[in-house]
Image (cartoon, coloured by chain):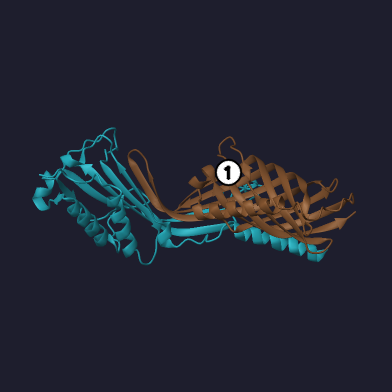
Chain colours: A brown, B cyan
Amino acid sequence: MKKHLVLYIVLLFSVSGLWAQTDSVNVIQESTNKEITLDASWSTALPMGQMTDEVKTTSGRGVQFGISQNVNNRLSFGGNFAWQMFYEKNYEIYIDENSVFSGWQRNYINAFSIMANTKYYFSNSVNNIKAYLSLEIGASIIENYQVVGLYEFKELEWHFAITPVLGLEIPATNYLGFQVYIKYPNSFKSKSSFHYSWINTGIGMYVKIPE
Amino acid sequence: MVMFRNIIIGFILLILVGCYPDSSISPAESDTVYTYRCPDVDFTDYKTYHLIDSVLRIDDYIDLNNTEGPYDQLILQRVEENFNARGYVKLIGDNAENASVNIYVRDLSAINIMQYWNYIPYWIYTNDAYVQGTAYFPVSLPSSTLIAPESNIIIDMIPNDFVIIPEDTLKVYWRGVTKGIYDINMQDRLIRNIDQMFFQSPYLKPAEE
């Protein structure tokens, strides 16, 4: 757990450091061309906070899709869809005042989110690599499914969700490129559920379609 | 367009499959062990026990069934070994009447039919009104049905001088329950689960003299 956290932090600082060391490099050519960007990525996730009471294992099952349109060369608006799945199997022992229950427990958490987002691109770039900060606001529906022996428990709740994002766009051609990002999705406490949060890292591709 | 649609359908199927990895469950992994202790009982007060000589079964008509199961002797022997290991003394024959507590072993194994609705979004379809054969529109057929014989062994510790209060209710000092999918080879699982019952009950020991 700690090892993963350190890796995420190192990656986070690498990304922000890359953006910070851009004094002597090219400035993105000012452009007001409108374009639509479609992106798809594979994401991994490390559970954080209260969620670690349910699962602690890093998830490698996740995909995200996005669509956005730029307002100018600094700002874009759009939306995205994400799915992340967490899974853990443990032998659990539950102790109550006068009773004890034990068995193999499987925990499945499937999180689907639909978010609106805005991206702010920093002005400096290295070899046209663009760093951006983004904020996503929307809703997530999270299914928390536990199976212990022949018993099962299922919780399905909508949550209000906010996700800060730090990312990089690495162009390969004028219209195609790669993206990497770190996200911190937060699905806030709902009526009968708790606050889910995790750290996402993702790698994917984007395509820009000029209008 | 058709290709695009196929890609979308393929992707949705991929996500659905990916939602529940490792979902097939082995019979051994279906085992659960539950133990309960009566809060106002001091188990150190008791030193001797009487173990019933056969496993009790109850049929559909709530009558005692005298058939003997293939693991009955194994279960009784393992229960005895665990109580002896804790320091309790087994009383047999005429002395059994003087035992502090009686140990009853019941087998409530049965065939269970479990139905699952895995539609997306399944919460629309999981209506409680669904009854096989008498369902009304809209009918939501289960996406899978598991017909599983279930092993269900219950071990009860009951005081020798028990009184029935209220009617048909016995005060149980200690109870151990193990449940799981019945398998052709239950031997190792039953031993492990009975041992787990005692592991979960460290208070089961008589006072040292």
Q: Quadrant of residue A117?
A: top right
Q: Quadrant of the N terminus of chain B?
A: bottom right
The residue nearer to you, when weighing A181 against A41, is A181
- Where does the image place residue B83, in percent across and percent down from the top left? 20, 52
Looking at the image, which residue is at 81% across and 46% down? A74
In the image, farthest residue toward the front: A24
In the image, farthest residue toward the top: B166
Q: How many marks?
A: 1
Using residue A151 as the reference point, say whether residue B76 is left or right of it: left
- Under mark 1, the amino acid is Tyr
- Could you tell me which chain the residue with mark 1 belongs to? A
Q: Residues within 10 Å of mark 1 (few under 14, many from 20)?
A: many
Q: Is residue B42 above or below residue B123?
A: above
- Where does the image place residue A66, in percent across and percent down from the top left? 75, 52
Q: Quadrant of the C terminus of chain B?
A: top left
- Where does the image place residue B101, in percent across and percent down from the top left? 18, 44
Report if residue B120 is visible in the image: no
The residue nearer to you, when weighing B168 against B107, is B107
Looking at the image, which residue is at 29% across and 34% down? B167
Q: Is residue A158 above or below residue A150?
A: above
Looking at the image, which residue is at 32% across and 56% down? B193
Report if residue B159 is visible in the image: yes
Using residue A175 as the reference point, say whether residue B184 is left or right of it: left
The residue nearer to you, when weighing B180 against A44, is A44
Using residue A159 as the reference point, say whether residue B85 is left or right of it: left
Looking at the image, which residue is at 61% across and 46% down? A142
Identify the residue position indicated by label 1 in the image: A196
